[in-house]
C-alpha cells in the first residue's frame, strides 16, 4: 500500500497490517474532541455508508484523545490492526491529524456516495507538527466574485492540506464585496461595474454588467464554517489605494471628490482615499467597526499596496495634512495613514498586516509585513524586528502561468510559477539574520483574479501548486524532496477529482 500524505509528516514509521473500518467500528471521543469526531463520522458516512457511533468511552475503534499540554496543532497518529489512536493537546491538533487519517484512506473517501471500497488504513506511527503557524491562501473576490458555496468548498480543500489561514481580499477598484450597514451605497453602487475586460484582451470590455457581494449573514456563515475547520479568516479592507469602488459610492472620500466609477479595467487606479480629509478616517473606522464584529481574527489586513501618490501631490487637503504633521513627502503621508489606522485598530485589540509597501515612508510600529514583491520587504522587516508573512510573487503567485507553454493555458496575468518553483519557496531566505528568523510567521499563496472569471479556473490555478506551498509551510527544508513530492501529487489528482476540484495536470511538470 503506497502512502502519499501531503504535506509530508515530520516523522512516519510504517508497520505491519491494516486497520479495517467496518460497520461495527466505533469512534471514541469525549468533550472537545466530539466536534472533530462528528466531522470524521460524517466523512465516513458519505463515503462508506456506515453510520459509525461516537461514544465517550470504549475499547478499540478510532480513538480521538485530548492530552494534557499547551494547545497546539501537533498530533500523533498510531494505527495498528486493533485500533486507531489519534491524540493531540487541542481539537486543532486532532483536526490536522484527521486530515492525515483521511489521506491514509482510499481516494473513494472523498466521494459523496457509498462505494464498495475496502476501508483499510495502513499501520503507521506518525508524529507531526507544522513548521509555521501561518499557512495561508488568499483569494481576490474583488476582480471576480465567487459565491459562498464556492468559498466554503475552497476552505474545505484548504483544510485537507492543513492550511490554517484564509485571507479574503474583499475590496477593490473593480468591486466592493462586503455589506456594510452604515454605508449601504458601498454595495448598492460599489459592488457593480458596467463591464469586465475580456480575458484575452485587457483593453476591450465585454459589455456585460457584473456584480456581487456578501451579506453580513453570509460572512458570518463563512467565518463559522472556516472556524469549524480550524481555519482563521483574515479580511482585507484595502486602503489607501485600490479604493475606487468605495469612491464611486462615496465620492467625498477622494481627493477630487467627484467623477468616480467602479473600474472596468485592470491595473492600479490613481484615485485613492484622500489622506487629508477627516471624513475618510471616520468612514474607515466605521467600516472596520462592522468588520471587527464579523471577524474574530486578531489580525486584520489593511492592504497598503500600490497606492499612487498623484492625487495627493495636488490635493489641498493632503498637502495641508503633510504640513500640519511635518511630513517630508507623500510616502510619509501614506505611512501617517497606515499608522493612524493601526493605532485605532490596536486600541480595538487588533493587529494589522499590510503588503510590503507599508515599509515605505516608515513602518507602523506593530505591523506585520506581507512580502509580495519578492522577499526583500520581508527580509528588511524581519531584520528590523517586525513579524512577516512571506508571499513572494516568484514562488507564491498562483495567478501566474504554471506552464511555459502559454498556448496550452487559459489567459493569465503573466509571470511563471511552476509546481516545482512553488515547491522551491523558502519562507526564511538566507538574508534574514538567524536571530530574527522567528519573525517569519509563515507564508501563503495568492490567488488574484483579474484573469480568473470562474470557480473552475480558481481551482485550476490553485491546485496542485497549493499542495507544494502547503508542504513548504508545514515541513523543514532538509525533509523536502521534489521528486518524492511530485510522485505523491500524482496520487492526489484522483482525490482532488473526487472533491470536484478542477486541478491542472501538466505533462511538462518537470520532475
Ligand atoms: C499585490 O499583488 N498587489 C499585493
Ligand atoms: Zn487628498
Image (cartoon, rainbow, N blue to C red):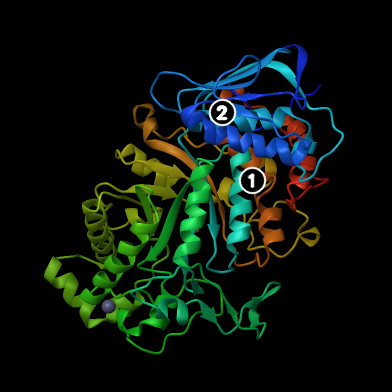
Residue 212's image quarter? bottom right
Q: What percent of the width, then of the height, locates residue 13?
A: 67, 13
Q: What percent of the width, then of the height, locates residue 46?
A: 73, 42
Question: Of label 1 and label 2, which has the lower sequence position?
Answer: 1
Q: Is mark 2 within 8 Å of ligand 1?
A: no
Q: Residue at x 73, y 51 (%)?
A: 501
Image quadrant where one finds the C terminus = top right
| Neighbours of disc 2 within 10 Å: few (<14), some (14-19), many (20+) | many
Identify which residue, 263 or 374, lies in the foreground: 263
The relative height of residue 169 versus residue 280 in the rendered view (above or below) is above
Q: Residue at x 69, y 48 (%)?
A: 463
Identify which residue, 117 or 459, lies in the foreground: 117
403 relative to 320 in the view: left or right: right
* Residue under numbered circle 2: 475
Using the rendered image of the protein, determine whether residue 400 is visible from the camera's viewpoint.
Answer: yes
468 relative to 392 in the view: left or right: right
Q: What percent of the width, then of the height, locates residue 103?
A: 70, 31
Q: Residue at x 38, y 48 (%)?
A: 297
Image quadrant where one finds the N terminus = top right
Q: Residue at x 77, y 37 (%)?
A: 49
Q: Nearer the viewer, mark 1 or mark 2?
A: 1
The relative height of residue 129 versus residue 275 in the rendered view (above or below) is above
Q: Secondary structure at mark 2?
A: loop
Identify which residue, 45 or 427, lies in the foreground: 45
* Residue under numbered circle 1: 157
Amino acid at each position: 500500500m503506497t502512502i502519499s500524505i501531503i504535506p509530508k509528516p515530520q516523522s512516519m514509521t510504517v508497520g505491519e497490517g491494516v486497520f479495517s473500518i467496518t460497520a461495527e467500528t466505533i469512534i471514541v471521543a469525549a468533550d472537545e474532541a466530539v466536534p472533530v469526531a462528528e466531522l470524521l463520522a460524517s466523512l465516513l458516512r458519505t463515503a462508506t455508508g456506515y453510520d459509525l457511533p461516537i461514544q465517550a468511552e470504549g475499547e478499540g475503534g478510532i480513538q480521538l484523545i485530548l492530552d494534557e499540554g499547551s494547545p497546539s496543532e501537533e498530533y500523533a497518529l498510531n494505527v495498528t490492526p486493533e485500533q486507531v489512536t489519534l491524540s493531540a493537546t487541542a481539537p486543532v491538533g486532532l483536526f490536522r491529524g484527521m486530515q492525515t487519517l483521511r489521506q491514509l484512506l482510499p481516494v473513494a473517501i472523498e466521494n459523496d456516495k457509498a462505494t464498495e471500497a475496502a476501508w483499510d488504513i495502513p499501520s503507521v506511527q506518525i508524529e507531526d507538527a507544522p513548521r509555521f503557524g501561518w499557512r495561508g491562501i488568499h483569494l481576490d473576490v474583488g476582480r471576480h466574485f465567487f459565491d459562498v458555496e464556492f468559498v466554503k468548498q475552497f476552505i474545505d480543500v484548504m483544510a485537507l492540506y492543513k492550511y490554517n489561514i484564509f485571507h479574503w481580499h474583499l475590496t477593490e477598484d473593480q468591486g466592493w464585496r462586503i455589506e456594510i450597514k452604515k454605508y449601504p451605497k458601498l454595495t448598492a453602487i460599489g459592488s457593480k461595474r458596467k463591464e469586465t475586460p475580456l480575458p484575452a484582451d485587457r483593453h476591450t470590455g465585454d459589455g456585460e454588467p457584473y456584480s456581487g457581494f456578501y451579506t453580513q449573514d453570509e460572512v458570518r456563515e463563512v467565518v463559522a464554517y472556516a472556524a469549524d475547520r480550524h481555519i482563521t479568516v483574515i479580511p482585507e479592507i484595502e486602503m489607501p489605494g485600490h479604493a475606487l469602488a468605495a469612491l464611486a459610492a462615496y465620492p467625498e472620500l477622494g481627493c477630487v471628490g467627484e467623477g468616480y466609477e467602479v473600474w472596468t479595467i485592470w491595473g492600479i487606479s490613481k484615485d485613492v482615499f484622500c489622506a487629508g480629509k477627516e471624513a475618510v478616517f471616520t468612514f474607515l473606522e466605521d467600516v472596520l467597526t462592522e468588520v471587527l464584529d464579523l471577524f474574530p481574527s486578531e489580525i486584520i489586513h489593511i492592504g497598503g499596496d500600490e497606492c499612487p501618490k498623484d492625487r495627493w501631490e495636488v490635493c489641498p487637503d493632503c498637502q495641508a495634512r503633510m504640513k500640519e504633521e511635518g511630513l517630508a513627502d507623500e510616502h510619509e503621508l501614506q505611512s501617517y495613514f497606515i499608522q493612524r489606522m493601526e493605532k485605532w485598530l490596536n486600541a480595538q485589540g487588533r493587529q494589522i498586516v499590510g503588503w510590503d509597501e507599508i515599509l515605505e515612508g516608515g513602518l507602523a510600529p506593530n505591523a506585520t509585513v506581507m512580502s509580495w514583491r519578492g522577499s526583500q520587504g520581508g527580509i528588511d522587516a524581519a531584520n528590523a524586528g517586525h513579524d512577516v508573512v512571506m508571499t513572494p510573487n516568484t514562488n507564491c503567485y498562483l495567478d501566474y502561468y504554471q506552464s511555459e507553454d502559454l498556448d496550452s493555458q487559459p489567459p493569465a496575468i503573466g509571470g511563471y510559477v511552476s509546481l516545482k518553483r512553488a515547491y522551491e519557496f523558502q519562507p526564511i531566505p538566507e538574508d534574514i539574520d538567524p536571530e530574527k528568523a522567528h519573525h517569519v510567521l509563515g507564508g501563503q499563496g495568492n490567488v488574484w483574479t483579474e484573469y480568473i472569471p470562474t470557480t473552475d479556473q480558481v481551482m485550476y490555478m490553485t491546485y496542485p501548486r497549493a499542495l507544494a506551498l502547503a508542504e513548504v509551510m508545514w515541513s523543514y527544508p532538509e525533509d523536502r524532496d521534489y521528486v518524492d513530492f511530485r510522485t505523491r501529487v500524482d496520487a492526489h489528482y484522483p482525490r482532488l477529482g473526487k472533491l470536484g476540484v478542477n486541478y491542472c495536470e501538466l505533462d511538462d511538470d518537470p520532475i
